[in-house]
Amino acid sequence: MTADIIADLVIHGGTIVSPDAEYKASIAIKDGSILAIGEQGAMPQAKETLDATGLHILPGAIDVHVHFRDPGYAQKEDFASGTAAAAFGGVTTVFDMPNTLPAISDAKSLAEKHAIARAKAHIDYGLYAVLGEDSLPNIHALIEGGVIGFKCYMGNTFGRIPSPTTGAMLELFEIVAPTGKRISLHAETNSIMERREARLRQMGRTDPLAHLAARPAVVATEAVARAAILAEWTGARIHILHISSAAELRPLAEAKARGVDITGETCPQYLVLSADDYEERRGVIRVNPPVREAENQNPIWQALVDGTIDMIATDHAPHSIEEKTREDIWTVDCGFPGVETQMPLMLTEVARRKASISDYVRWSAENPAKCWGLFPKKGALMVGSDADIAIVDTNRTWTVDDNLTQSTAKISPWHGMEATALPIHTIVRGRFAMKDRQLQENARGWGRSVHAIQAMPTPDVRHVDQTMAAVTSQTATNKGSVAA
Ligand code: NCD
Ligand code: ZN
């Protein structure tokens, strides 16, 4: 280290957590990147120092599943409040879902959302585009406009984006496969749950448990298996969002064993809430896929531990108090916030289940970065990585209070829950987004899209001679008529 290098910030005294180890070291940051990690005496001079004694230093969490509602439903959340909530949760990058208004399914809507996000975001982000019949002609324009990936709604949910038929899905997978972009799936089969919901409504069921009755785990399991088959056939990369049941783990594990590029996430709600909570929490815990029977929790946790499930995301889905407390369960909006409480609640769960903070870092940062080609710029505390850092007190007992959150949504199932960890500072590319539990106002507008970082390996495309495009091309048609 030459004496004349002056770092912007040096953090002393903390315990750095990597996916393999925890160790005491200082960390120096310059121009938004990590410049050095080592003993305090080996650090360069710095313009600013931070004492992190007693705290853990984690790579900022990457939450690959949030709904920040902007544009279109800013009364529920916008990019400023959503990214402020993320900063308070130790999250430094989010991937925002496309079921906004308008939905993100063409270059124009994407460009508009990019402008909104760039102006308001406190932390970094990627933007998803819809993968459906409407966006089919726009896939390449969307990629050029800068997307982190595509979201395919196999089941209807908030925003009423129609789910593509299996035929359309195959064609969409064929188009996306050669681009290497990952397709994230809301894997719930529409026809099964619509049929059951209609019958339950006819019977007059309006109670919270009717929501679960309409969507048993087979709804998700069938969708995971079907998506995996289409991915295997085309070579498209896929990601299973919000794994909620033990039953989904078999098709997921089997597809991985067959070499399908398939990854999976689960969310805190499937680990800490259960069907036993409907009576008390009613519509507040209504979410798609539903919170299920308690016996699903341990297998889902085990799947995280053994790597079948790759990561933790939140499906942060804010709605108003009125929208969450309606009497008739079918009229309650689905989803609830989570980006702000994921890290505290999951570190609490890690401590309770005797996993390690290193495991948590693998699930919250390293694996999300790897699955979308952001690693090691994101998701790692290494020399040269972006200085995206969560500095956490893992020894702080506190109680979640919806009224004190950054999110506009002041209602969640987390209200009143006790956590044993709390992010104290959050740094995004070298700049504090949150410091001492205070939002740093100059961080607004600092967030940037991460789509250009992507370094995905070359995709392994299959059956190119049998795609819709191949069999309907002029040459294929001519060949057919000659043979006939
Ligand atoms: C999400 C929302 O509100 O946008 N709701 C939910 O219940 N999960 C949509 C989604 O992720 O499917
Ligand atoms: Zn979803």
Image (tube, rainbow, N blue to C red):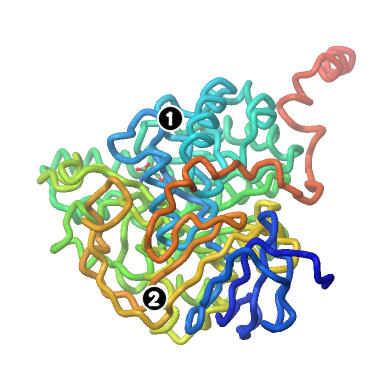
Is residue 131 left or right of 283 when viewed as pictured? right
Q: Quadrant of residue 36?
A: bottom right
Amino acid tagged 1 = Pro
Is residue 220 left or right of 449 when viewed as pictured? left
Residue, disc 2: 421
Ligand 1 visible in quadrant: top left
Q: Secondary structure at mark 1?
A: loop
Q: Above or below — where is 295 with respect to 83?
A: below
Q: Are marks 1 and 2 in contact (CB under 8 Å)?
A: no
Q: Residue 210's spot in the image, x, y percent? A: 20, 51
* Disc number placed over residue 145 in the picture, else none: none
* Quarter that holds the C terminus: top right
Q: Above or below — where is 228 with respect to 467?
A: below
Q: Residue at x 55, y 32 (%)?
A: 114
Q: Badge 1: how crowded within 10 Å, few (<14), some, or many (20+)?
A: some
Upstream in sequence: badge 1 or badge 2: 1
Q: Residue 479's spot in the image, x, y percent? A: 88, 17
Foreground: 446 or 270?
446
Residue, disc 1: 162
Q: Residue at x 62, y 49 (%)?
A: 238
Foreground: 434 or 56?
434
Q: Above or below — where is 133 with respect to 291?
A: above
Can residue 209 be seen at all in this image of the molecule?
yes
User: How many numbered markers are drawn?
Assistant: 2
* Quarter that holds the N terminus: bottom right
Can residue 213 be seen at all in this image of the molecule?
no
Amino acid tagged 2 = Ala
Q: Residue at x 53, y 33 (%)?
A: 130
Foreground: 201 or 281?
281
Q: Badge 2: how crowded within 10 Å, few (<14), some, or many (20+)?
A: many
Q: Nearer the viewer, mark 1 or mark 2?
A: 2
